[in-house]
Image (spheres, rainbow, N blue to C red):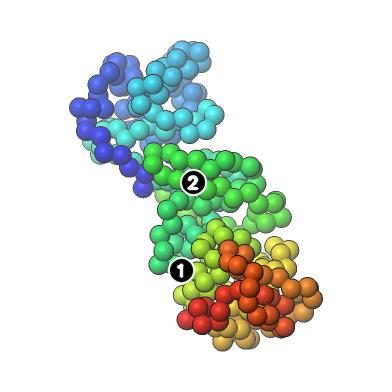
Amino acid sequence: MVTESVTSDEKRKGLSKMESYLLSYLAENRKNIFTLSDVVAVLDCTYENAKVIVGRLAKKKWIVRIIKGKYLIVPLTAGIKGEYTEHEFIIATLFEPCYIAYWTALNYYGFTEQVPNKIFAATMKRVRDREILGMKFKFVHISEKKFFGFNEILISNVRIKMSDKEKTIVDCLDKPRYCGGVEEITKAIFFAKDEIDFGKLASYIIKMGNNTAIKRLGFILDLLGMNMDSKNLEGKISNSYSILDPTKRKTGKYDPKWKLLLNVSEEELKW
């Protein structure tokens, strides 16, 4: 959760009665993230007046502009529940169309022991990385062809798109640098082996259209003794060699079956 330690007295300084009413009303109605149209509706004011009010609140550091036209209430004591936070997944998916993915999704499903220091999201838009209330967000641009394989999860009554278990693995194989490299992917597949559908996994990775990702998956499955699952991928790869882990130096031995330069030793990958 995105949090900030601020006392009630500190937060109440400088607020007019109208501003206090606006923020309390929005928070009590689970509108921690709001738009100018919300301000107009709550205060029955003009759009121009709403812009002035929002600008004043931002200057006083009571709200943060997340993206154009959308604002986040900085932790505020609101109503009898005193809610202080907004979930970082909710903030990330404001930059739609996108879904939570890569290292963040691996951690969500329990397929890694590592806790990423930023939130990873896949998006068809080009969105710059940013930091909001101390939380870092990494937005990975993908093509429309790769924008599939996600489910909706419910957080604070908000529907959030999250890559499903199989697509999480496939996305990581497609772009290993956003999950800690092939060692982390191998570990994830080992931990996930009883929870994922390997037929769906093969179908997804072929649909992605990344030949190198197919090679990586086939090699890892063989390495983990899942040879029956890797058979669906044989004959789907090109004859040119690809690199196993693009986050490592390009040195090592070659694997003739999966046409990979093994720049990570099998000993480092085995589980």
Residue at 35% in and 26% down: 61
Secondary structure under the numbered disc 1 in the rendered image: loop
Q: Nearer the viewer, residue 250 or 222?
A: 250
Q: Which residue is mark 2?
A: 137
Q: Residue furthest right?
A: 239
Residue at 40% in and 60% down: 115
Does the residue at mark 1 contact the one at mark 2 (Cβ under 8 Å)? no
- Horizontal arrangement in the rendering, residue 144 relative to residue 247 (left or right): right
Q: Nearer the viewer, residue 41 or 131?
A: 131
Kind of residue indicated by mark 1: Phe
Give residue 146's quadrant in the image. bottom right
Q: Nearer the viewer, residue 177 or 17?
A: 177
Q: Residue furthest left?
A: 9
Res 42 visible:
no
Coordinates of residue 256 in the picture (x, y in percent): 72, 83
Residue at 60% in and 44% down: 97
Q: Nearer the viewer, residue 11 or 164?
A: 11
> Looking at the rendered structure, which numbered label has been put on residue 111?
1
Between the residue at mark 1 and the residue at mark 2, the CA separation in whole angstroms equals 20 Å
Give residue 81's quadrant in the image. top left
Coordinates of residue 259 in the picture (x, y in percent): 72, 77
Q: Which numbered disc, 1 or 2, marks the residue closer to the eye?
A: 2
Residue at 50% in and 13% down: 48
Res 208 visible:
yes
Sequence-wise, the earlier of marks 1 and 2 is: 1
